[in-house]
Image (cartoon, grey):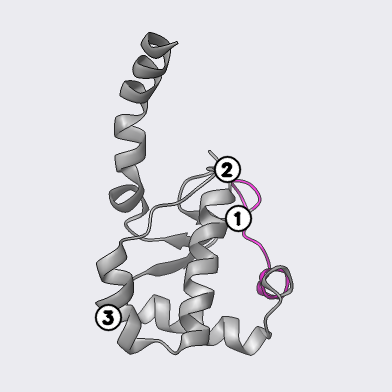
Amino acid sequence: MARKWIKLWVAESLRGTTRFEFTAEERGVWYDLLAMAGDCREDGFIAPGQDKGYPLEWIAGTLNIPLELLKRAIDKCVKSGRIEQTLKGLRVLNWGKYQSEYDRQKKYREENKTTLQ
């Protein structure tokens, strides 16, 4: 399901391992990939559908970055356990763990919206 927003952990983004292991450009790609994963139909995947991922050239073009930068960032993400490359496309690991709080609270927000109106 495509989201209108994704959750980022503030402390981890500012002081976590991504800050020290990635260059500023690579961090930008990581955050862009998270946004793309939030925009795709299947949670955590960067893919147009269920059977095949986007070509890396397409992702680089969409993000308006050099292909080499994308490959370098993906390689670091794979090595650090943030992303895996599958036949279905790139998959952000632990997506459900990091994004699930929104889904968990969704029913309560909907109930409050109805009672407040």
Disc 1: CA contacts within 10 A as few (<14), some (14-19) or many (>=20) = many
Question: Is 38 rendered above or below residue 59?
Answer: above
Residue 45: give x, y in percent of width and height: 51, 54
Is 89 in the magenta? no
Q: Are there few (<14), some (14-19), or many (20+) residues within 10 Å of tag 2?
A: some
Task: Return the residue at label 3.
Answer: 17
Chief SS of the magenta region: loop
Q: What residue is disc 1 on? A: 47
CA distance for labels 2 and 1: 8 Å
Q: Quadrant of the C terminus?
A: top left
Figure quadrant of residue 56: bottom right
Q: Is residue 53 magenta?
A: yes
Mark 2, secondary structure of its residue? loop
Residue that numbered label 2 is attached to: 41
The type of residue carrying mark 3 is Thr
The amino acid type, in three-letter code, at marker 1 is: Ala
Q: What residue is at 35 percent from the left and 39 percent from the top?
A: 102
Disc with the residue nearer the chain's start (2 vs 1):
2
Determine whether, in the image, residue 52 is placed left or right of residue 76.
Answer: right
Q: Amino acid at mark 2?
A: Arg
First to last magenta residue range:
48-60
- Asked whether the residues under the numbered discs 2 and 1 touch, taking CB atoms below 8 Å apart as contact, a structural biologist would say yes
